């Protein structure tokens, strides 16, 4: 079977070039970012302690930087107290992590999507921090970055890049979640035509309690070509310093408890017309572009988390004895390590393939691919965290260990940035557009109402994209000499029809991982030319 057999015409037109895209490597774990040009210290992560039944040291991630500033992230404390301490936030700001993709001319790190994904492997080790950073830059300020004008960029990005100002993305409302186009917040032009008056309530806003700058979506009246008045959505940059902005108290959440999630109310908030992002009436497209743009990084974030889980649990599996044998000798425990390894491998493959495509000139639209990465990775992470917890049996269920927290933190991934149900609809219906054009007028069938069919189609497409990414990465690895057996084996094990997809190979992968107490595969960004 060749790669082209996987490709539906019009669906994955860019994938045939996939193997080249793994050449966009720039960051490695434990090493400074090689293309660093600005003055921020360089973030990297220490070798972390493995599981220890006498203390909870494994709950602390340590972000180091070359200037000897050390930021200790105590995830247990963040979860327990439901807040990220100011000193931790300040440490993250000093590392430049609030301006990862803001261009250097505005004081950011100016990193590519690939590098953003690479850093996501590290920041995802604390869910609350990952969501705080993502709410700020993957959605909060992204509108200014991708659709703002030069004046808006010059005015807002420098303080956002350093973290002096925090950003939030305000779309969801009490009556409008998945159906984002139904928002009721309204912006009315003042008589002098210089301001909009903003009124309405936004719900579930990450960073909502402390954001200084918000991207807010509201209905505005527009007059169309035929002179008809219509309500259309417009995107605005709103400063908390403008009057009439109030935040509710933080939500008490299941997971990512240290991230701040609040209701925000706007009451006659006066927003200058200069603060419209893009065109009046063009806000829905801005919102979708922002969301579509950020989802791909969930793949590398999930992979980073799973690799950490493998490190944490493998030592326990190899030392804990039951029935006079270590857990690692049991096939069903080995299966869990193979599942974790396989998921991390696939998520990495999908995330870096997509990031590489997004980094190509001309800002190609990768919204479909990004949605597939998001669905696969959010569900894969959930399964893997549960399997890691299961390795520890009863201990995994206690608060002495981080697994229950990882499980709680991980659950949100299937809900926000587009629920997996809505994204499956998007994936299936987008994937059918080619066939739809051909069949229009020939058959009478309202496919949009056939959700169970759409779910199956979406799952097929997600798996096809995953296999495309995995086979592409594997074939590149073979051709450039990264040919560890397990790496290539993984590629084939993930292809359901491959003869390599058998129990013996699954065990082989698990045994290798358990022996090294770590994820064994090369990184997709290794060896770039
Ligand atoms: C911790 C957290 C942080 C968040 N941060 C932000 C933020 O920063 N900014 C922001 O704007 N929003 C944010 N949100 C909101 C988030 O994007 C919404 O929760 C999400 O879009 C779903 O909306 P909803 O909760 O109203 O669920 P609903 O839309 O009411 O959906 C409920 C369930 O029904 C399903 N469903 C809905 N419609 C369909 C359909 N047509 N077919 C099949 N199934 C369907 C959904 O998938 C879901 O499972 C956040 C939410 C949370 C929990």
Image: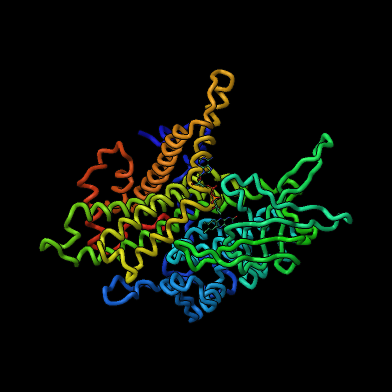
For this view, does 146 lie left or right of residue 486?
A: right
517 displayed left or right of 273: left
Residue 287, percent from left and from top: 64, 50
In the image, what residue occupies the spot 81% across and 37% down? 228
Q: Is residue 36 visible?
A: yes
Residue lying at the far left of the rendered structure: 324
Residue located farthest toward the top when viewing the structure as drawn? 442
Q: Is residue 145 left or right of residue 425?
A: right
Q: Position of residue 474 (x, y in %)?
A: 36, 47
Choose between 255 and 432: the one closer to the eye.
255
Residue 341 percent across, percent down from the top left = 32, 54
- Tell me the quarter of the picture where residue 523 sits: bottom left
Q: Is residue 57 above or below residue 167?
A: below
State the image coordinates of residue 488 (x, y, percent, origin top left). Answer: 31, 48
How is the protein colored in the picture? rainbow
Q: Is residue 406 left or right of residue 136?
A: left
Question: In the picture shown, does residue 262 fall above or below 444?
Answer: below
For the point 41% across and 51% down, the residue is: 347
Number of marks present in the image shown: 0
Which residue is pictured at 27% across the width and 56% down the height? 337
Of all residues, the one furthest to the right in this rendering is: 192
Q: Tell which of 4 and 339 is nearer to you.
A: 339
Among the 4 quarters of the image, the one containing residue 58: bottom left
Is 191 above or below relative to 440?
below
Near-viewer residue (1 or 344): 344
Which picture quadrant has residue 472? Answer: top left
Q: Is residue 370 visible?
A: no
Q: Quadrant of the N terminus?
A: top left
């Amino acid at each position: 079977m060749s790669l082209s057999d996987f490709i539906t015409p019009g669906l994955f037109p860019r994938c045939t070039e996939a193997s080249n895209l793994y050449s966009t490597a720039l960051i490695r774990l434990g090493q400074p970012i090689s293309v660093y040009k600005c003055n921020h210290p360089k973030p990297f992560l220490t070798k972390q302690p493995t599981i220890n039944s006498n203390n909870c040291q494994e709950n602390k991630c340590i972000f180091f930087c070359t200037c000897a500033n050390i930021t200790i992230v105590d995830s247990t404390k963040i979860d327990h107290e439901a807040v990220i301490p100011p000193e931790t936030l300040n440490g993250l700001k000093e590392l430049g992590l609030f301006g990862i993709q803001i261009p250097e001319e505005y004081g950011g790190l100016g990193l590519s999507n690939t590098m953003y994904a690479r850093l996501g492997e590290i920041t995802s080790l604390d869910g609350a921090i990952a969501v705080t950073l993502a709410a700020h830059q993957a959605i909060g300020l992204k509108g200014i970055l991708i659709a703002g004008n030069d004046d808006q960029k010059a005015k807002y990005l420098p303080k956002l890049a350093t973290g002096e100002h925090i950003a939030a993305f305000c779309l969801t409302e009490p009556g409008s979640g998945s159906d984002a186009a139904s928002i009721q917040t309204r912006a009315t032009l003042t008589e002098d035509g210089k301001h909009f008056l903003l009124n309405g309530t936004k719900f579930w806003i990450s960073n909502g309690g402390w954001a200084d700058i918000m991207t807010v979506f509201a209905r505005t009246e527009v007059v169309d070509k035929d002179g008809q008045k219509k309500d259309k959505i417009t995107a605005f940059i709103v400063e908390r310093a403008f009057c009439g902005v109030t935040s509710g108290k933080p939500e008490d959440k299941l997971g990512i408890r240290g991230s701040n999630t609040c209701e925000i109310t706007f009451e006659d908030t006066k927003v200058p017309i200069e603060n419209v992002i893009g065109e009046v009436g063009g806000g829905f497209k801005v919102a979708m572009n922002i969301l579509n743009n950020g989802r791909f990084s969930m793949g590398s974030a999930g992979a980073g988390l799973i690799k950490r889980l493998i490190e944490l649990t493998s030592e326990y599996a190899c030392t804990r004895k039951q029935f006079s044998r270590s857990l690692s000798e049991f096939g069903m425990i080995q299966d869990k390590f193979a599942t974790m390894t396989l998921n991390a491998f696939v998520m990495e493959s999908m995330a870096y393939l997509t990031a590489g495509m997004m980094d190509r000139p001309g800002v190609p639209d990768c919204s479909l691919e990004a949605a597939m990465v998001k669905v696969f990775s959010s569900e894969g992470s959930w399964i893997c965290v549960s399997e890691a917890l299961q390795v520890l049996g009863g201990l995994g269920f206690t608060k002495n260990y981080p697994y229950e927290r990882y499980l709680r933190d991980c659950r949100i991934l299937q809900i926000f940035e587009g629920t997996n149900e809505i994204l499956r609809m998007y994936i299936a219906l987008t994937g059918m557009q080619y066939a739809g054009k051909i069949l229009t007028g020939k058959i009478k069938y309202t496919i949009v109402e056939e959700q169970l069919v759409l779910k199956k189609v979406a799952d097929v497409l997600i798996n096809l994209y995953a296999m495309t990414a995995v086979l592409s990465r594997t074939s590149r690895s073979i051709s450039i000499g990264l040919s560890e057996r397990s790496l290539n084996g993984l590629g084939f094990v993930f292809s359901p029809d491959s003869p390599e997809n058998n129990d013996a190979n699954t065990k082989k992968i698990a045994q290798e991982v358990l022996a090294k107490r770590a994820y064994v595969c090369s990184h997709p960004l290794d060896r770039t030319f």
